[in-house]
Image (cartoon, rainbow, N blue to C red):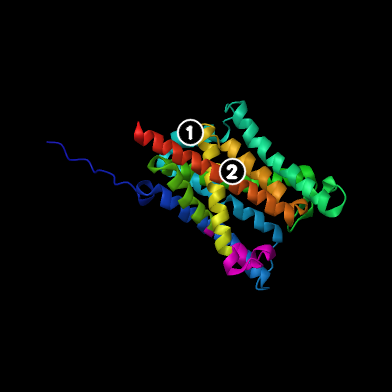
Amino acid sequence: MTTPSIIRQPSLISRYPVPAFFIVAYAFSWTVGGLMVAGYHGAVSVPKGLHYISAFGPAIAAFVVTAIVGGQAGLADLWRRIVRADVGGRWWLIGLGTPLALGLAAVVVYTLSNGALPGPALFGEVDYLGNIGVPAALALWIATYGFGEEIGWRGFAFHRMAPGGWLRAAAIIGVLWGLWHLPYFFYKENFIALGVGGFVGYIISITMGSILLSWIYRGSGHSILLVALWHGLFDFVSASPVAEGAGSAIISGVVIVWVIFILRRAARHKVSTAGA
C-alpha cells in the first residue's frame, strides 16, 4: 500500500495572475510616487529624476508574475514578444511612422504659432532632468514609458485578458492604467493643474490610448517591441516643449479620431460576423 502523495495547491498568484500583476505594478510605482509626493511637499529629499523609475512598475510586475506562474517557459515567451521584429512593413510603418508624423504636425503647429521653426534641441528637454540631448531623451522615453510600461500593460495584462474580448480588455486596462498615474496628480505640476475634472478627462484619454496600443499589439502579432517603440516615440514628441498648447491638442485629436475609426471598424466586423 502506497502513501498518497500530497497535492501541491497553486499559490494565489498562480490562480489570479492578472490581479497579482496589477498589485505588484501599483505597489512598486506608487511607492516611488509616494516618495515623489513627499519630496514635493518637503517631507523628504529625493532626486526628482526618481520620477522615471516609477515607469518600470508594470515591467517588473510582468517579469515577477510570469516567473512565478510560467517559469522559464513563460519568461522565454515573454522575451520573444519583447524582441519580436518580424511584424511586416505595414506595422513598422504604423509603429514608427505615425508617432513621427504626429511629431511633424507638432513642428508645423509650433512654427505657425511662433513664426519660426523649433530648434531640434527642444526635443531634448525632459521634465526634472533638463536638456539631456535628443538621443538621450529618446532613449529615456523608449526605455521607461515605452518598455517599462508596455511589457506590463500590453505584454502581460492585455495578452492574458484579450481572449475574453479585446476591446473590453483594452478598456479595463485603460482605466487601471489611468489610475496608476494617480500619484502624478499630487507632485507633477502639469497634472496638478488638470484638477478633478481634468483627471476624469485624463482617464478617458488614457483609455483611448489603451485601445490604440492594444490594436497595434494584436495586429502586429503580439509584438511588445512595436508598441514600446510607438509609446516611447509618442511621449518623446508629445512631452516636448514643441508640442505644448495647440500642438498637444492636435496630437490628442488625431489619436481620438484614429481610435473612433478603430471602434467603428470593430463594430462593423462584429455585425458582419454575427450575420454570417
Q: Which-is-in-front pick, marks 2 and 1?
A: 2
Label 2: how many Cα within 10 Å (few below 14, some 14–19, many 20+): some
Circles 2 and 1: CB atoms closer than 8 Å: no
Residue 262 location in percent, x, y? 53, 41
The answer to whether one can see residue 19 in this image is: yes
Q: Which residue in the structure is indicated by mark 2?
A: 258
Query: Secondary structure beneath disc 2?
Result: helix
Residue 230 x/y as whole percent: 63, 40
Residue 77 image label: 1
Q: Residue furthest right?
A: 116
Q: Could you tell me residue 199's position as x and y percent? A: 57, 63
Badge 1 marks a residue whose secondary structure is helix
Residue 142 in view (yes/no): no
- Looking at this view, name the residue that lies furthest to the left: 1
Q: Is residue 184 magenta?
A: yes
Q: Which residues are magenta?
A: 179-198
Left or right position of 258 against 160: right
The three-letter code of the residue at mark 2 reads Trp
- Residue 40's place in the image compared with 68, above or below, is below
The residue lying at 53 percent from left, 54 percent from top is 177
Majority secondary structure of magenta residues: helix
Query: Residue at the location (15% across, 36% down)?
Result: 2
Left or right of 106 in this view: 230: left
Residues 159 and 249: in front is: 249
The span from disc 2 to disc 1 (Cα, nearest Å) is 30 Å
